[in-house]
Image (spheres, rainbow, N blue to C red):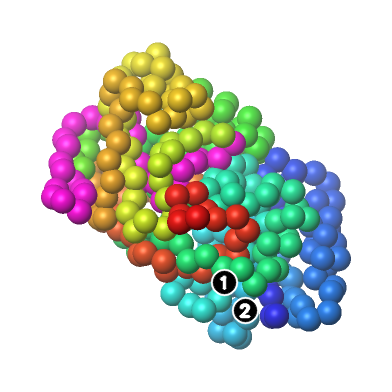
Amino acid sequence: MRVGIVINPISGRRGSRPGEPARRRAFIESRTAAPGINATTVMTEGPGHARMLSHAFVDQGYDTVIAMGGDGTVNEVAQALVGTPTALGILPCGSGDGLARGLRLPSGADAAMAIALSSSCTAIDVGTVGDRIFLNIAGVGFDAAVARAFAGRSQRGAMGYVKSGVSLAWTYSADHYEVKWHTGDGEEARRGRRFLVAFANAPTYGNGAVLAPDASLQDGVLDVVLVDAGTPLQQFWRGRRLFWRSGSPAHGLERSRATRATVHGSALVCHVDGEVFETSGALEIGVRPGALRVRTGPTPRGAAE
C-alpha cells in the first residue's frame, strides 16, 4: 500500500503546543513502519498547501492520502481526491472534527490510524458550492461569520468556537437572502432576512453541536437548515437545538432537503467546512453522490447497515 500523509502541524487545541509538529510526525512514522506500507509524510506550510501536496500523491498513483488535521485540512486533501481511485484517510485532530464524527471515526489516534490504513472503503457524497467542495457543512450567514472570527483567534479548540459564537451573537445583523432549492418533488423558495442558511452533508458541526441529525453522507441529498432573523436571545434559544433535542422543531427554524439550491444575496459571507470566503449575487449549491472514497470503520451515519 502506497500511503501519503498530509499533516497540519498547528490544527486544533494542541497545535499551539511547543514541539507539536515533531510529535505528530513521530507518531505517523512509528505507525507506518510496518511491512507492506510505503508511506510518505509531508507537512503543510499554509492555506492551499494540503491540496497541492495531495494532487501530487494522486498523480503518482498513491492508494490512500491521509489527512491529519481538522475539517479544513480534510477538505483541502479531498479536493484532490474527488472522482479518483485514491481513498481519503482521516486522523482527526482539529477544533471540531465534524466529518470524523459523522463517519463515526474514533477520536483516539491509534484507532483512527488503524482505520486510515485499512482496506475498508465507503463512497460518500460531496457537496458543491460553486467550484468549491464541502464534505461536512456549508453555510451562509452567522456560522460563516463565526468561522471568520474564529480564524483570527489565538485560542483554538471547542472553547474558541464557543467564545467567538457567543460574542458575535450580540452584534450580528442578519442579511436578506433569496433561497431556492429542489427537493426532488418540486421547488421551494424563501425570501427575507435569515440568521443562517446552511447545507449539511453530515450531521454535526463538531464538538457535539448537531445541526442536521438526519443528514446522511450516502443519500445523494443535502439537508437544508434555515434560521430566521431575530434577537440575540431568540437565537440562543434556537441554538439550544444544536446540543439538546436536535431533531425537535423550534419556532423560526426550518428544515428541508435538496438535490440542488441557489442562494441570492448582495453580500454573501460563506464557508465550506469552516473555510470562509465572500461573494455576491447567486451562489449555486449541489451534491455529487458517491464521489469520494473514504477509509472507514463502522458504517457512516444514515448508510445502510
Query: Horizontal and vertical percent for residue 89?
Result: 62, 64
Residue drawn at point x = 31 percent, y = 28 percent? 253
Q: Is residue 237 visible?
A: yes
Specify few, some or many for label 2: CA neighbours under 10 Å numbering under 14, 14-19, or 20 or more.
Answer: some
Q: Are marks 2 and 1 in contact (CB under 8 Å)?
A: yes
Disc on res. 269: none
Callout 1 secondary element? strand
How many numbered circles does the render carry? 2
Spatial CA distance of label 2 from label 1 is 6 Å
Residue drawn at point x = 50 percent, y = 40 percent? 205
Between residue 60 and residue 275, name the one nearer to us: 60
Residue at label 1? 87
* 275 in relation to 226, above or below: below
Q: Is residue 43 left or right of residue 167?
A: right
The image quadrant that residue 26 belongs to is bottom right
The image quadrant that residue 133 belongs to is bottom left
Query: Horizontal and vertical percent for residue 286?
Result: 30, 58
The residue range painted magenta reads: 180-207
Whether 199 is among the magenta residues is yes
Q: Which numbered disc flags the more N-terminal residue, 2 or 1?
A: 2
Q: Residue furthest bottom?
A: 60
The image quadrant that residue 69 belongs to is bottom right
Q: Is residue 33 left or right of residue 101?
A: right
Specify few, some or many for label 1: CA neighbours under 10 Å numbering under 14, 14-19, or 20 or more.
Answer: many
* 153 in relation to 33, above or below: above
At label 2, the amino acid type is Asp
Residue drawn at point x = 82 percent, y = 65 percent? 31
Residue drawn at point x = 63 percent, y = 58 percent? 297
Residue at label 2? 63
At label 1, the amino acid type is Ala
